[in-house]
Image: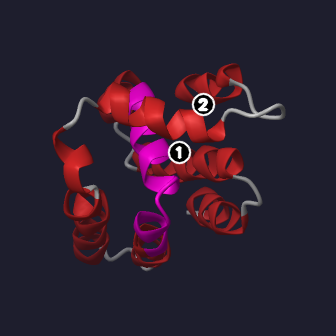
Amino acid sequence: IDTIVRARRACDGASTLLERVSWDLAFHLAIVRAAGNPLVETKFRAIQPYVVEILLRSLTDTEVTYQGLVFHERIATAIAERDSDAATAEMQHHLTLGLTLFGSDTDRNLNLVARDALESLVTDTVTFEDLMRLTHEG
């Protein structure tokens, strides 16, 4: 629970988009690990590159970021209170938020959506390699 709360706080306080994506991924991974099911963690690791692509899309959209990060506190609180029904409901809302806010990106290939988000991130201080490292973190 401490790891989940720490990752949530760090995500909220991140000063760069790359840092926020990294902490958002850490938040979700901490929840997966807290479930204590190695099969679920293995499955999460298998889709981790896609999770990073979704996070890039989400966190480069101010409306998705604004509405989505609110759920992190609700989820962390429900988990800390050991309220599995509330945690499940909040996570379901959080994970489906993009479907209502992504607009035309919902029907686009995720690789193309992520590529568009990446183009806005790659600078002299953030490289493509920095971003791709996130697909294997944890």
The residue pinned by badge 1 equals 25
Main secondary structure type of the part rendered in magenta? helix
User: Which corner quadrant holds the C terminus?
Assistant: top right
Do the numbered discs 2 and 1 sit on residues whose CB atoms are within 8 Å? yes
Side of 131 relative to 107 (left or right): right
Magenta part of the chain? 48-66
What's the residue at 25%, 29% (across, down)?
A: 109
* Mark 1 Cα shell of 10 Å, populated few (<14), some (14-19), many (≥20): many
User: Residue flagged by tag 2: what amino acid is it?
Assistant: Leu
The mark nearer the N terminus, 2 or 1, is 1
> How far separated are the C-alphas under marks 2 and 1?
8 Å
Looking at the image, the residue that sits furthest to the right is 125
Q: Is residue 23 magenta?
A: no
The residue pinned by badge 2 equals 134
User: Residue flagged by tag 1: what amino acid is it?
Assistant: Leu
Image coordinates of residue 68 in percent, x first then y, are 41, 68
Q: Quadrant of residue 9?
A: bottom right
